[in-house]
Amino acid sequence: MGIFDPVKGFGVTFGMMFKKVATEEYPEIGAPAAPRYHGRHQLNRHPDGLEKCVGCELCAWACPADAIFVEGGDNTEEARYSPGERYGADYQINYLRCIGCGLCVEACPTRSLTMINFYELADDNRQDLIWTKEDLLAPLLPGMEQPPHPMRLGENEQDYYVNGPELARDRGVPEHETVETDTEEAVR
Amino acid sequence: MTVAPEKSDVDVPEGYVKLTIDGEEIVAPKGELLIRTAERLGTVIPRFCDHPLLDPAGACRQCLVEVEMNGRPMPKPQASCTLTVADGMVVKTQVTSEVADKAQQGVMELLLINHPLDCPICDKGGECPLQNQAMAHGRTDSRFVDKKRTFPKPLPISSQVLLDRERCVLCQRCTRFSDQIAGDPFIDLLERGAHQQIGTAETADVLDAASHTSEPDSASAGKSASAGLDSASAGKSASAGGQPFQSYFSGNTIQICPVGALTSAQYRFRSRPFDLVSTPSVCEHCSSGCAERTDFRRGKVMRKLAGDDPEVNEEWICDKGRFAFRYAAAEQRIRRPLVRNVETGELEETSWTEALRAAADGLAKARDGKGVGVLPGGRVTLEDAYAYSKFARVALRTHDVDHRARAHSAEELDFLASRVVSDGGPAGGGVTFSDLEKAPIALCVAFEPEEEAPAVFLRLRKGARANDVKVVHIGQWASPAVEKTFGELLACAPGGEAGAVDGIAQHAPDVDEALRSEGAVVLVGERAAEVPGLPTALHRLVERTGARLAWIPRRAGERGAVEAGTLPTLLPGGRPVTDADARAEVERHWGLDPGTLPADPGRDMTGMLNAIVTRDLDGLLVGGVDLDDLPDPALARKAFDAAEFVVSLELLPSTVTPYADVVLPIAPVDEKSGTFVNWEGRRRPFAVTLDGTGALADCRVLDTLGVEMDTDLFTQTSDAALGDLDRLAAATARAAAPDHPSAEPPAPGDGQALLATWRQLIDDGSLQIDEPALAGTARRVVARMSRATADGLGDHVTVSTDRGSVTLPVEVTDLPDGVVWLPGNSPGSKLRATLGAGHGAVVDIAGGDR
Amino acid sequence: MSTSEKAPLTPVLTKRWLSPQSWRLETYEKLEGYTAMRKALSAAPEQVIQMVKDAGLRGRGGAGFPAGVKWGFMPKDEEKPHYLVINADEGEPGTCKDIPLMMADPHALIEGCIIAAYAMRSHHCFIYVRGEALHPMRRLHAAVREAKQAGYLGHDILGSGFDLEMTVHAGAGAYICGEETALLDSLEGRRGQPRLKPPFPAASGLYAAPTTVNNVETIATVPSIINGGSDWFRAMGSEKSPGPKIYSVSGHVERPGQYEAPLGTTLRELLEMCGGMKDGIPLKFWTPGGSSTPLFTADHLDVALDFEGAAEAGSMLGTTAVQVFNETVSVPWAVMKWTQFYEHESCGKCTPCREGTFWLAQVLERMVDGRGSEEDIDTLLDVCDNIGGRSFCALGDAAVSPIQSGIKYFRDEFLALCESNRPARAAGTVASPEPVPGSDSQAAQPVGAQA
């Protein structure tokens, strides 16, 4: 035990005073998660604003926590929400149950369901933690149009799927951001 | 037919052969297909086009195996679905042969190159033979990197069946089914090679039209001829509507499709095989009692599939059985008891306790007054019918019970009591489905098999195709069923059937001769009740020729109701009411004091209705009866209006509801268990599909109602009801044979015609509500008459009586002159409701404006 | 003629072809026409069959099944009507023997039909002519009319008590209808797709009645056998493949055409008859019997072109449609064209042929376009293996034979296509392709279609 030993202990403290602070000022200042962090879900859109979800319910089937409920509906000539025959008429994710495993995303055949890095999934009542389709849908980007509306890109389905993103750019949809926004802009 | 032990000295019975499959010796009946012999050994050879009930095709080439005959290997792998077993054959399947395994993998890869990868959203995904076999016998990766063949999808080939041509593997099961089994070859292959596809005449026109419009200026000389043809045919289809896939059995093609190419408009994308709960069930629509599989999810029936019952429906059901089930989930279904408010005169929802008390009080009062009649309707289960039967006798102390919500006669009562009830069913030597297939002759009298009992039609057709069963129809015109059973029509005027049967030895001696041969069968429909003397004539015919007779009613519950004694002359088990011993036996069994049961028969349905009008009857207890089905709907309305007290046990608001004082909701078949007795007399028990919905079966409601009226029926559950019925041993006495005079059909005067009618399978029946896609496959509603009768009437005919009139387009058909045929209950042709007339009536005909 | 005198031309079927108006009954009767028929009608049907058996006549449609044996399969009783159907749906790429025969000598066919029908107790004969062959059809119609007027057809032919009706039917242009059961379906008015065998046509063929389907050339040979006798017939050709055969030589030769020579003639001899290779450009590859038979190369010049010889050398005799290609033709390109033909003509009934030809054509098109890879060659061979012998009828086998043999003999050319992006232009060995005679045919007869 030396005479400086008690002071030595403060050395660490002093030393830390000149280092970068690791504490996150949350919630006063936001703390963005890594861009590819698996936070809440998002229902993506085609570049003209139509929904990608076809109401197939595979996400609900893949979910090990039974957190997803989907019910499909028929698109009609008058009211088209997605290209093709069916769309997700009712879509709910119960964040009390969701364990964020991402199996639903893997199951999705149309890449409609992805996860964004928004993670503030806490609330003081159960009802608000059941997110519905309105909450989950990706925001409309420039050039997109709120469904229902007919398929706007290309003459036929082949065109729509294959050349859609290209045609969308002419309508002002920003490049690389046509379908899956993974930034926090998409917060509700 | 068991697997032979591994010894070479296996006994080979006569008609069998011995062969070796994968080193194991097996004995197989001659003519068996290799693929099935292997299956009995436990080796499943993958296949698509093969189906045990269809003729072999050998089209998909998935079932290739290596075969050695007489020590010489065959140079190429053989399709085991077309190869019959032979003595000394040595077969190597994919289990032991690399060649066979590679061949199967190769074919699988070829099948998959043009198959879309849409399993995640495909209805078949999860129960798909292609998916399963690709997992079992396919490569893990695809070498195909080029362009897949694509088609626009889906293509509706009828309002109910949708075709996704990209998914189709062209196994031709659907086309072979519709050609061979149903006899409606409205779909076939179109185009060739890689462009080959399934289509109808209508879709073929669509294709032509599409190719035509894509090059509108095809004015080149070579093109113009074919373009002209195309537009001509397209124009034709636009005007005549083409020939859509109009078949009563189209749904089966969806079920046997080994991929997701055929889907139904009703089920498409509604759920997935792996989230359905399946229960075996029995069809509630006709008297065939087809086995079904009911799939439900989230408390809602999503689809019905044909069950596999080789003795009854094999693997087929009609579209009505498959698609008509949404009535049970209809918006307007009655789910709570209703009691009529005395002050307002409105029906009001109330509790079960209150409703039952109100019903019991009202019924007891009416019973103690002039009495109560019971009309259970023809759609009851055996147990429910028994409960009605017992309730009438025990709680209401009457024989006034009649389930026949249709044309009926006293002669029919005698006929049912003497020839139909308690004939022992298949075990007791009654006519069965299998008998139809092997009979030398099947004579259909006043019976339209395709419309009234489709499973019977399929068997008749199968018999006619495979075993040359001679099908003879006594009817009015060569309906599709006559043609498709390769049948012979003995045409007679409506009402003249009795005369035709009596005179068969004179005008069709060959038929008479055939009826005398072993196994001959006579089938009679419920329409017989409308023809005076026909039941008697049939009785005479079978007594004379020794042919066996089967009564095939239209509704599922009729035969069971006869057994349960919901007839004014019959007690349960076929006991005649007039037989004192039978009455005493039933009284003992029911714990009644001797002499409680009245000794005289009760009134039949029309008798009861008349009695109410004349104030000789006070109350009515009604099951599922539609007044417009009754022989005289006007009389029925008058009677119901006059009745002091009416209790209705119903599922949906009906024509009875406005007259009911108490409405008690009951369970549809999906929500209860029970037993239908099909026309063979075979019991078709089914368990509850949707459990815990709170809906009660009729027998349960009547039991509780009985308790309220201080009697105990012991029919709380269907098991209890059936047990109670079965403890009554079958009757020994039999009623006397019918003996009623027949009448010549009336001669229509000028501007008049005799009305021939029966109901079409798909029509305006109350169990077919909420099914627009099914309704789209109904047959065209037309009035049929001979050219001479139609002469001068124009395109449309108005058929009228003093009650009303029906106007329909005319179709000239091979009817006898002076006869008009109309469908019985189709849109725009509801004969009982509008004309108040039935089969054999005289009606006025005139040219009609549309 | 520039050919040497040892060229063994044996004009039997073709001997009347150059006579003026050879298609008229008058001409035919002058040149021993309808004499064999008289002989045959005076004999018993069994004797006729025996004679044809003795002659060893083998089917000329491709498979080479002995005609007499085939006739013998017909039931002896006449419970159901018997039918004789002539397969004149000649559509095999490169094959042109039946159509010229019907053009030049239709009465030979009709006389053969009468004899054959008599031998198998048939009273109705159908001639199913390829729909595109309009001119021969007109000649046939006229010939049938003439024959009928002369009493050779119809009721009680020449007082023998034998009746025969003859119907000339136009096909609607499908290669598959050269397959005998597909032909029967088509004749019945159905979709032309091969039927499941058994039952074989001899038991249940046209309208489910006993039927024999024979090739035009087979039947047209019959009168000369009846007249010449089996020994005379056997003097030509080899022990197992006796008789003369029309070799239809096409492609890069000086004088393409039909050369009737005994079976067993070699290509070297045929080339001599044809005046050698066109413009002296050396031979590269050739087909012995249409595109459905595996290719031969210059190494096979001395292969005896009879049923056994061709099979021994790894090909088939087929319809003896000898297509000759010189050094200017790219093998992958020719193979691609043939494969496109089979893709177009596959009937679609069975999976391997329907999907396989679709795939093969795409791969070959890609390779010829220079977008192929070495793995594609293996894929081609493996897919061929999965089609050959697995398909419902012989069309699948036929479709793969040019690919398999093409890769077998000319793998280097396929490899060269895969080396760079556009090797077809870059590589010196492969010149720009030239149209291949015969490959543009729209319909043909599959090998094995009939005997």
Image (cartoon, coloured by chain):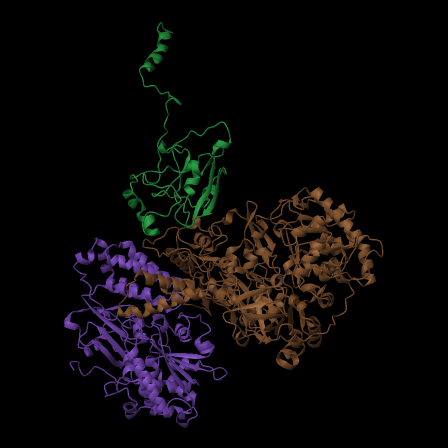
Chain colours: A green, B brown, C purple
Picture residue at 36% right of the left edge, 63% below the top: B209
Who is closer to the viewer here, B416 or B790?
B790
Q: In the figure, residue C249 lies in which quadrant?
A: bottom left
Q: Taking the image as drawn, is residue C90 in sight?
A: yes
In the rendered image, the residue lying farthest to the right is B594
Q: In the figure, residue C390 lies in which quadrant?
A: bottom left
Instruction: Please provide percent x and percent y for residue B692.
Output: 63, 44
Instruction: Please provide percent x and percent y for residue A32.
Output: 36, 28
Q: Is residue C134 above or below residue B455?
A: below
Q: Is residue B524 above or below residue B628?
A: below
Instruction: Please provide percent x and percent y for residue B451.
Output: 58, 65
Q: Taking the image as drawn, is residue B730 in sight?
A: no
Q: As drawn, is C13 to the left or to the right of A139?
A: left
Q: How many discs mark residues in the rendered view?
A: 0
Q: As drawn, is B371 to the left or to the right of B504?
A: right
Who is closer to the viewer here, B625 or C103?
B625
**Which corner quadrant holds the N terminus of chain C?**
bottom left
Instruction: Please provide percent x and percent y for residue B526.
Output: 65, 66
Q: Is residue A55 above or below residue B450?
A: above
In the rendered image, the residue lying farthest to the left is C279
Picture residue at 81% right of the left edge, 56% below the top: B587
**Which corner quadrant holds the C terminus of chain C?**
bottom left
In the rendered image, the residue lying farthest to the top is A3
Q: As drawn, is B453 to the left or to the right of A164?
A: right
Q: Is residue B351 above or below residue C151?
A: above
